[in-house]
Each structure stands twice: as structure tokens, then as C-alpha cells.
């Protein structure tokens, strides 16, 4: 695996960039904590997605502050924020924008003019993304992968950085459409929001039932975030850790000879190579956020489940035994421990 790709960067400059990264990361957490209570793992995963340049699918019950979390993160990052409320009648052009005919009042000459849709933002909140048909959901595919969209044969680049933070409700099935596998695979994380502890719920009530309105302040900008994304990619990963990533990802495929028997029994399709790419990038960001200059086995294993839970497809045997993706992935971590001595 590659070593630190910063050989051409002066040590003083690199130390300065890392110091700024940590300063911004800590200030983002401080600002978000003004508004959001608890959910430490969720906040960490969303921040990793931002520092990596990936997209995040946030799954949670109603009232778990999914939308509030995304809006607050956008405020702290100082980026252009747009929201799309996905509904069954939403059309692809409502996301990407469309061409309209404009007439010059003096000459009478008519021209096509492109009117940008809400996708032209830095942070796009796709609220309740599973409430719109696959045709409309697919309008995000090109944007999420290529950072561009095509309308009437014309290709338009999106502003950078560009993040899609999508939310979905896991319990309502009526009026919802499962996300296509190809689109799910483009999300770095499937982050799950659970219920808060009694103490945290009391803190939320105290915070939101008075005249005080909590606000987060911007702490960075688009240029810095793009620099942080390059900094994360410069973090080294040892060959043994890289091989462990590949081992864990390949073990999720029932067709692979290294897969345990329970994977062959319960899994139809495992994770693709994109899962390995995202797992390495996410582990690099986590290492830097934890004050380390290299990726450890613990970084990889801590992020394994949120990176893969939406990338494996279970069969009817798993359904009959009431097993979920998380159950299979936990068993995989037990079956494939990290090499000893690390």
C-alpha cells in the first residue's frame, strides 16, 4: 500500500495543515453540540464523510433530528446548503434544473437558458429520499459519482465540495420506494440514528422548550474543506492493514472461497471493491481525527459495519431467521479478527 504521499510537501507546511485540520474538526464538534445532543458515532461518521468527500445515508426514526443534524453541519461548514423534500410526484428536472425558452424583448430572438436546480449546492439534503420513484432517484446517480449532471445533452459541473446527505425512515413501507442498489453503493456510510438515553432526552427537552434558539456558527469554508480532503488521502496505510481491509470485504461475498459458512448461507451478494476503497478512505480520516498519522486495524474495524451494511444483500434464509445486515457483519468481524501483535 502507498506510504505518505506528501514527499513533496515541506514538513512545516504539513504540520500547519494538520494542526488546522484538528482545530477545525474540534470547533465543528463544539458548534454542532450547541444544537445536537448525543449521537457521537453518527456525528463522527458524517464528519468523516465530509472530510473524505463522500455521501452519507442517514437512517432513523421520525423525530431523531436527522434533518436538524444535516442543516447544522452545513451551517458550521460555511457552505451553500439546499434541501429537496422527496415526494412521489417529484421529477428529475426538479432536482437537476431544466432549460427554458427566454425571449429578448428588443429583438424577439428566443434562446434556451438553463435554470439550475437545487443540486447546484455544496451540501444537498435529500430528505426522505425513499419517497420518490427510482426514475427521480436516479437523477442523483451521475451527480454523486461524477460531480456533474447532464440536461438535454449538456454537461454541467457541480460546485465543489459536493455532498449528498440523504435521510430515510426505516419503518414506513407504504408510499416508499427502495433505493436502487447502484445508488446505495455510492453512499460512503449508511448511518443509523437510534434513540437517546434518558439524560440526553431530558437535555433535548431543556434545550428546545425555552425562548433560547441554539445556533451554530461557521468555522471553515469550501477551500479549506477541499484541502482537508487532500490531506486525508495523504495519510499512510500499511500493507498488512490494507490486506485486512480486502480480507474483510471479500469475506462478505458468498461466492468467495474465504467466506465463512454463515455468509454462504445467508448472503446473496456481498460488497464491491468500492466498499474497500471507501473503507480505506474513511479509516484514514478517522485516524487523522484521532490524532494519528497512520491507519490502524481499529480504524478499519470500527467503520466496517456502517460502510458495508447497505452493500450486502441477504437471502430468504436470513429473513426467515430474522437476521439483519448488522448481525452478519458482526459475525464476520468475529470470524476475521485483526492480525495479532497490532
Image: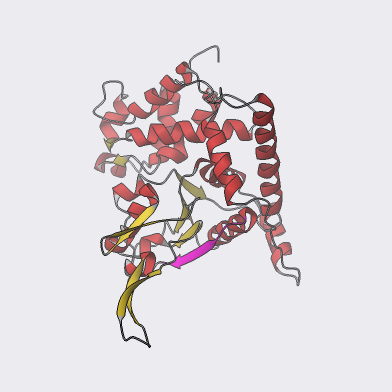
In the rendered image, the residue lying farthest to the top is 341
Residue 81 counted in the magenta span: yes
Which image quadrant for residue 103?
Answer: bottom left
Is residue 251 in view from this perspective? no
Q: Is 112 situated left or right of 55 in this image?
A: left
Viewer-proximal residue, 276 or 100?
Answer: 100
Is residue 3 in view from this perspective? yes
Residue 189 to residue 178: above or below: above
Quarter of the figure with the N terminus: top left
Residue 52 counted in the magenta span: no
- How was this image coloured? secondary structure
Q: Position of residue 333 (x, y in %)?
A: 44, 27
Viewer-proximal residue, 62 or 3?
Answer: 3
For the point 34% across and 31% down, the residue is 252
Viewer-proximal residue, 253 or 202?
Answer: 253
For the point 32% across and 35% down, the residue is 272
In the rendered image, the residue lying farthest to the front is 107
Q: Position of residue 226 (x, y in %)?
A: 55, 44
Q: Position of residue 291 (x, y in %)?
A: 66, 30
Is the magenta region chiefly helix, strand or loop?
A: strand
Q: Is 233 situated left or right of 138 in this image?
A: right
Q: Position of residue 195 (x, y in %)?
A: 57, 53
> Magenta segment, which residues?
78-85
For the point 44% across and 43% down, the residue is 188
Residue 176 to residue 262: above or below: below
For the point 33% across and 76% down, the residue is 100
Quarter of the figure with the C terminus: top right
Label count reads 0
Amino acid at each position: 500500500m502507498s506510504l505518505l504521499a506528501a514527499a513533496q510537501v515541506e514538513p512545516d507546511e504539513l504540520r500547519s495543515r494538520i494542526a488546522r485540520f484538528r482545530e477545525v474538526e474540534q470547533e465543528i464538534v463544539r458548534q454542532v453540540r450547541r444544537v445536537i445532543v448525543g449521537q457521537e458515532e453518527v456525528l463522527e461518521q458524517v464528519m468523516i464523510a465530509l472530510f473524505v468527500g463522500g455521501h452519507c445515508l442517514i437512517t432513523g426514526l421520525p423525530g431523531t433530528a436527522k434533518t436538524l443534524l444535516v442543516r447544522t453541519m452545513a451551517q458550521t461548514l460555511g457552505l451553500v446548503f439546499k434541501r429537496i423534500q422527496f415526494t412521489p410526484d417529484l421529477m428529475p428536472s426538479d432536482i437537476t434544473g431544466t432549460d427554458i425558452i427566454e425571449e429578448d424583448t428588443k429583438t424577439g430572438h428566443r434562446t434556451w437558458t438553463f435554470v439550475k436546480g437545487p443540486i447546484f449546492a455544496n451540501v444537498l439534503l435529500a430528505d426522505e429520499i425513499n419517497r420518490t420513484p427510482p426514475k427521480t432517484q436516479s437523477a442523483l446517480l451521475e451527480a454523486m459519482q461524477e460531480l456533474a449532471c447532464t440536461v438535454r445533452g449538456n454537461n454541467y459541473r457541480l460546485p465543489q465540495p459536493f455532498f449528498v446527505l440523504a435521510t430515510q425512515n426505516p419503518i414506513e413501507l407504504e408510499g416508499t420506494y427502495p433505493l436502487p442498489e447502484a445508488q446505495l453503493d455510492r453512499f460512503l456510510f449508511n448511518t443509523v440514528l437510534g434513540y437517546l438515553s434518558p439524560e440526553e432526552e431530558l437535555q433535548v427537552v431543556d434545550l428546545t422548550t425555552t425562548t433560547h434558539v441554539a445556533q451554530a456558527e461557521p468555522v471553515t469554508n469550501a477551500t479549506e474543506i477541499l484541502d482537508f480532503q487532500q490531506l486525508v488521502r495523504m495519510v499512510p496505510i500499511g500493507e498488512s492493514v490494507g490486506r485486512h481491509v480486502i480480507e474483510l470485504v471479500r469475506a462478505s461475498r458468498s461466492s468467495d472461497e474465504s467466506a465463512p459458512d454463515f455468509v454462504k448461507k445467508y448472503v446473496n451478494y456481498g460488497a464491491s471493491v468500492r466498499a474497500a476503497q471507501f473503507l480505506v478512505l474513511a479509516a484514514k480520516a478517522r485516524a487523522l481525527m484521532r490524532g494519528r498519522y497512520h491507519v490502524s486495524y481499529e480504524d478499519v474495524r470500527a467503520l466496517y459495519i456502517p460502510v458495508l451494511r447497505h452493500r450486502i444483500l441477504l437471502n430468504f434464509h436470513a429473513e426467515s431467521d430474522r437476521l439483519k445486515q448488522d448481525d452478519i457483519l458482526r459475525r464476520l468481524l468475529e470470524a476475521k479478527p485483526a492480525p495479532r501483535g497490532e
